[in-house]
Image (cartoon, grey):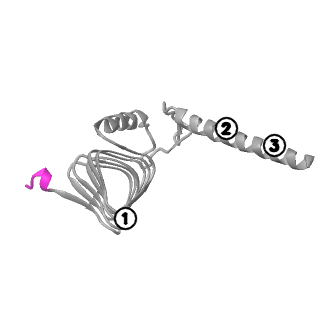
Amino acid sequence: MADRQEQLTVIGADTLVRGEIIAQSASYILGKVEGNIVAHAPLQIGLGAVCKANIQGTSIVVEGTVEGNVIASEKLELKPTALIKGDMTAAKLTVTEGAAFTGHCAVGADAVATAQQLANHQAAPSLPGRAPTLTNGTYSNGTSSNRSNVTTTEHVDSALAGLEAKLAGFNKSRAAAEVS
């Protein structure tokens, strides 16, 4: 029998997986995944693969598209064709020219520990086969998240203050034009 480290799990290009994948051996995804992926061995998201999933793993290589948050406890590598729409956290990060991502990025062992703690703390039960989505602190299945909205509140307050300042300047210009 082959050693577990010699095994390779492949999700083919013509395959769609919905739900949660927990991989104990090296995995190579070429198809589509919707849900969550937890990889306890190296994981590669191949060219053409589309993962609408939150991913946690040790060593992750991305060549395809990921729509979700990625946490790599050891290393995250983005190849030239990689596209990530979500937050990335990794102990070590390699971004090859041509790769693209939209979201926040945190690198270092402390960042990984914080992200893993937050991800585990936010995990909420859901219906079988359906990953919960978080909107305004409430999961789609009705449970609450303890996630603080401080960052969002600060951004909104800052944006409103900027708009108020612009509006005040506009009103002064308008009043001056009416007097003239």
Residue found 31% across the figure and 60% down from its top: 96
Foreground tag (3 vs 2):
3
Confirm or deny contact between disc 1 and disc 3 (CB under 8 A): no
Near mark 2 (Cα within 10 A), the count class, few <14, some 14-19 or many ≥20, is few
Q: Is residue 103 above or below residue 112?
A: below
x and y, in percent, of residue 51 in the image: 39, 57
State the SS at label 2: helix
Residue found 40% across the figure and 35% down from its top: 118
Residue found 16% across the figure and 56% down from its top: 7
Foreground tag (1 vs 2):
2
Confirm or deny contact between disc 3 and disc 2 (CB under 8 A): no
Near mark 3 (Cα within 10 A), the count class, few <14, some 14-19 or many ≥20, is few
| 43 or 99, nearer to the observer | 99
Three-letter residue code for mark 3: Lys
State the SS at label 3: helix
Cα separation between marks 1 and 3:
47 Å
134 left or right of 59?
right
Residue tagged by mark 1?
Answer: 98
Three-letter residue code for mark 2: Ala
Magenta span covers which residues?
1-6
Residue found 31% across the figure and 35% down from its top: 110
Comes first in the chain, label 1 or label 3 = 1
Q: Quadrant of residue 171?
A: top right
Residue tagged by mark 2?
Answer: 161
Residue tagged by mark 3?
Answer: 172
> Can residue 3 be found in the magenta stretch?
yes
Three-letter residue code for mark 1: Gly
x and y, in percent, of residue 108 in the image: 30, 40
| 133 or 61, nearer to the observer | 61
| 163 or 78, nearer to the observer | 163
x and y, in percent, of residue 75 in the image: 26, 48
Comes first in the chain, label 1 or label 2 = 1
